[in-house]
Image: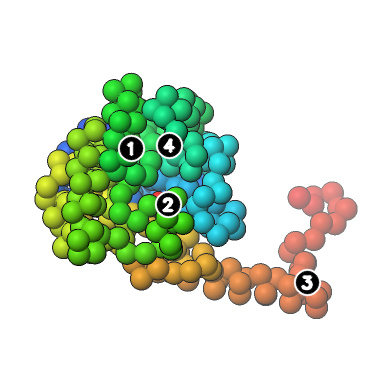
Amino acid sequence: MSTETKSEYASHKPLTIPDVAARKGKTPLVCLTAYSTPQAELADRHCDIVLVGDSVAMVVHGLSSTIGATLDMMIMHGAAVRRGLKKALMVVDMPFGSYEESPGQAFRNAARVMMETGCNAVKLEGGLRMAETIAFLAERGIPVMGHVGLTPQSLHVFGGFKLQGRASDAARIEDEAEAVAYAGAFSVVLEKIPEALAHKITTSVSIPTIGIGASAACDGQILVIDDILGVYAGFRPKFVKRYAEIGVAMTDAIAAYADEVRCRTFPGPEHVFHDMPNSK
Ligand code: KIV
């Protein structure tokens, strides 16, 4: 647990892209998603990178996959997260359909995301097929975080949220990660791949690897905030660790409120106004 005081926290300089690159092979990068200002404020104290993930479509908007996330959705949540961050590096996911067509399409939409949210970088899914686009963005001032292995926007191609990079498929994922690094991404997310493969990629690529279901061999870790807090009631992958059961606390609080309203014990005398001279 962090023992940092309020003033130590306030004295931190915001993390930059070169700072992240310099963490390769050093203290693991702590990354977490956030979708709102209050979540960002909480994450900022303890995390190096805050990602406005397209997982927002599932955990906030109730969709069954990330495919339904839109550019407007990402920008609205991104702007909210920006208002809650002081020191963490902020990355916003490019949603499905906003970048795959051409480097030009990706640049236009990524520039809009950066201008309208104030984020430091964007993340996009795909290896070899996205290398040209990653280079195009990076050369034009848009830092890119790559994402290979299980790329949830390709859910239907994979036939589900399946482990990637098994046996003979390992070389393909390795090539994808190499291509992302070579194209100029500043870091790469490795999702749901075997530990040995994550280790191999982490030792071979020059940029930090951020694992999600990819073992502690990576240069950092990322999880979805609603998953670690026990708020998201949808499916729970093996790689998720719940650090709290806030969903249970929320249900109990709502049930207690409902009971008290029904039996008229809420509002109590302390919540009631009276038309008297000194009443606040
Ligand atoms: O959308 C998301 O939350 C992600 C993960 C890597 C956490 O892409």
Q: Gap between marks 3 and 1, in whole Å? A: 55 Å
Give SS at disc 4.
loop
Q: Residue at x 51, y 50 (%)?
A: 67
> What residue is disc 2 on?
154
> What residue is disc 4 on?
100
The kind of residue on which mark 3 rests is: Val
- Work out whether mark 1 precedes mark 4 in sequence or the reverse, and give the earlier one: 4
Q: Gap between marks 2 and 4, in whole Å? A: 12 Å
In the displayed structure, would residue 76 be above or below residue 158?
above
Q: In front: mark 2 or mark 3?
A: 2
**Tag 2 and tag 3, C-beta contact below 8 Å:** no
The kind of residue on which mark 4 rests is: Glu
Question: Can the viewer see residue 3?
Answer: no
- Work out whether mark 2 precedes mark 3 in sequence or the reverse, and give the earlier one: 2
Q: Gap between marks 2 and 3, in whole Å? A: 47 Å
Q: Residue at x 58, y 37 (%)?
A: 72
The kind of residue on which mark 2 rests is: Ser
Give SS at disc 3.
helix
Q: Which mark is residue 130?
A: 1
Q: Gap between marks 1 and 2, in whole Å? A: 13 Å
The kind of residue on which mark 1 rests is: Met
Give SS at disc 2.
helix
Hey, which quadrant is residue 264 in on the image?
bottom right
Frontmost residue, 257 versus 152: 152
Q: Which mark is residue 261?
A: 3
Q: In front: mark 3 or mark 1?
A: 1
